[in-house]
Image (cartoon, rainbow, N blue to C red):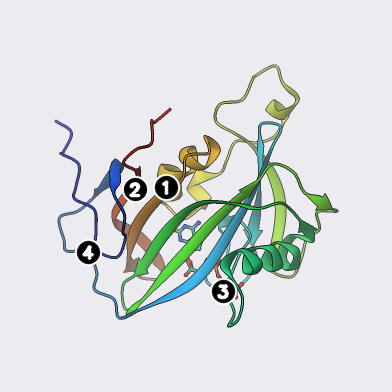
Amino acid sequence: MPSPPRATPPGIDGNLKHVVSGGDDAEWMPFETRKLYTNAFIVQDGKVLLGYKKRGFGKHKYNGFGGKVEDGETSQEAALRELEEEAGITAPLEYAGTLLFLSEGSDVAFHIDIYRAEEYSGTIAETDEMRPEWFALPSINPQGPEASSPSIPFAQMWDTDVHWMPLLFSKTAFVGRADFKREGDVFAPHKWWFGVSADVELP
Ligand SMILES: Nc1[nH]c(=O)nc2c1ncn2[C@H]1C[C@H](O)[C@@H](COP(=O)(O)OP(=O)(O)OP(=O)(O)O)O1
């Protein structure tokens, strides 16, 4: 029997409606402070641009392009700067959602504002940090040109991204939280919750 939806976790606000949640019954991890980050995705012609992270935390995973919001910057300014620094392009980024990410052993919660755009300018370029690659969305037309791109490599991404990416692709603003436990060198998801504003009609 599916378990009932969990209550909205601590640290995320608003009048929200549950979409998906899971994990074990342990408490949500406590945190002292919140650090602001960004993550940006280009979604175009049935494909999404992801970057293979070559160094740093999250190395060897595919992700959007992003990083820390610096002092004096808005999150959107940071998202534009990071997209340019990591993929060499600029884009009319629009807010798409917020993810609160916690990892065992740290009292800092990463508050990640997620952005998307359907067009970009400039030439996509590999950088020291990221190798950009296009992947076909799950809902592609098998006869379309996008079908020649590989499928999104969820097995090589942060494990809970598979739960919110459909909301990103359907342009449904979402909010969620994912707590990860440390298992040796790797981080394993232990509890997650994603939702949307209570007045949103889900596709
Ligand atoms: N798609 C994603 N799903 C997820 O669950 N957690 C993510 C995530 N993208 C980033 N995180 C978490 C993990 C990581 O600790 C933190 C910061 O992520 P980033 O890799 O974007 O930042 P960087 O350390 O590269 O920052 P900069 O050095 O400023 O570029 O946010």
Q: Is residue 58 left or right of residue 119?
A: left
Give coordinates of residue 35: x percent, y percent. Answer: 45, 76
Amino acid at dot 2: Phe
Q: Residue drawn at (31%, 72%), measured in percent from left and top?
A: 104
Dot in front, 4 or 2: 2
Label at residue 174: 1
Q: Identify the image quadrant of the N terminus.
A: top left
Q: Secondary structure at mark 2?
A: strand
Is 186 displayed left or right of 62 in the figure?
left
Q: Amino acid at mark 4?
A: Trp
Which of pointers 1 and 3 lies earlier in the amino acid sequence? Answer: 3
Does residue 54 lie above or below 90 as drawn? below
For label 4, the SS is loop
Using the numbered discs, state the Cα–Cα distance from disc 1 to disc 3 in whole angstroms. 20 Å
Disc marking residue 68: 3
Q: Which residue is drawn at the image coordinates 58% and 83% (left, top)?
A: 71
